[in-house]
Amino acid sequence: MATFNQALFQHLTDGLDRGGVVSVVDEVTGPVGAETVGHLMADSRLSMLAAAAVLNRYDVVIVQHEYGIYAGRDGDQVLDVLHRLRVPVIVVLHTVLGSPTPNQRLVLEQIVEAADAVVVMSKTAAARLFEKYVINAAKVAAITHGAPTPILQGAAPTRLPDLVSGAVSDVASALSAVTPHSAYSDEFAAFTARPSGPTILSWGLLGPGKGLEWAIEALADLRDLTPAPRYVIAGQTHPKVLEREGEAYRTSLMNRAVALGVDSMVRFDPGYRDTQSLQRLVRSADVVLLPYDSSEQATSGVLIEAVAAQRPVVATRFPHACELLANGSGLLVGHRDPAGIAAALRRVLTEPALAATMTAASARLAPDLAWPAVAAQYRDLAAGLLAARAGHAARIHVAAGFAA
């Protein structure tokens, strides 16, 4: 969420518009970025009033909505701010639940009612919103999740050295032995490249439901490939999972890799990566794997970034994958299906013509997924709202709403 808001804010305000960010925080600690103009804290009426006052200084407010971000029952405290805004409001729905509770449905319907426009990030999310909620359909716009502009163009992956030295055979010490990302240089100069097999990559915040256990099981069916592929799992554990369960999920993945005898094929990269470092990592992959358990996920930023980077994709049949990969840029597999995952990966890794076709299909989608193109759609939407209120076009001063 924070990464999305930061990227959208950057591209909306890049040399064109004045902007500011009101951050959602548990408490205000330490220095804040220059773009931060306010904070919204849970259960604080004073904070809510102050946030609304700051946001009303701008021409347009963009509010990021995700479950678990805002306080109150099903996040209903965000309504206290929305109802006090006098400027046009765009609400970005990062999740549209297919089976909401009655109160979740009510809160989201009230959020849509309070907004001047609502953005969803896929056709699937739009259809779900129309079918499951009583809302004004005229307010809804579909604008894809953005992705960084690729550093490199073309089909060939950019080879990088091993990201983590050693396997995970010593499960108890594996996490502490991983080199922190702060020790990496941008070019990974601290490592020496060595011959290796093709790279399978999964990245994002780790936690139950990511399906990475099925991916590790699938590796057992790929040990006959020469050279054997390596599977890179990049990303920190989700903060809420870490608070609740520690590194139990990551450790369970390590244990599974050892038990299946594929620990030498798995690399964990648990550090934080900035945009450029992540782009280089994605470009190093021969195939991106999204083995998610969810059959409800209507938006995936990881999927968007993989396609924008023109990497072949293997994904389970969650709604956004079914929609975005329909043009041939990826292969779909069943949920919790290691055999199906292995078969799809084998095809991508051993059929160069198939991989090239998938890359070409992604290349046709990539320009519309880049952040500059996505931000332009938000700017057009904001300008339309301002014109509707004022009767003419106006220069936009945008507040990038709330960022967790």
Image (cartoon, rainbow, N blue to C red):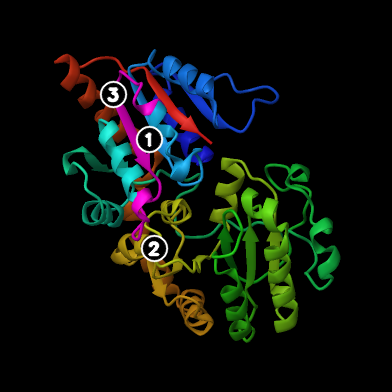
Instruction: Return the x and y of residue 133 as percentages of the image width and height.
Output: 25, 51
Q: Position of residue 22 (x, y in %)?
A: 50, 25
**Residue type at numbered disc 3:** Pro
Q: Is residue 143 visible?
A: no
Start and end of the magenta stretch? 81-104
Number of the label disc, if any, that sits on residue 88: 3
Instruction: From the top left corner, tell me how far across and down residue 263 is, in percent.
Output: 73, 75
Q: Residues within 10 Å of mark 3 (few under 14, many from 20)?
A: many
Left or right: residue 183 compared with residue 118: right
Give whichever of 72, 283 is nearer the camera. 72
Q: Comparing marks 1 and 2, which lies closer to the viewer?
A: 2
Q: Residue at image x 30%, y 18%?
A: 86
The answer to whether 255 is drawn above or below residue 68 in the figure is below
Disc 2: which residue: 296
Q: Earlier in the sequence, mark 2 or mark 3?
A: 3
| Residue 328 visible in image | yes
Q: Amino acid at mark 1?
A: Pro
Q: Nearer the viewer, residue 95 or 105?
A: 105
Separation (CA) of disc 2 from disc 3: 31 Å
Q: What is the CA distance from the residue labelled 1 to the residue labelled 2?
A: 28 Å
Q: Secondary structure at mark 2?
A: loop
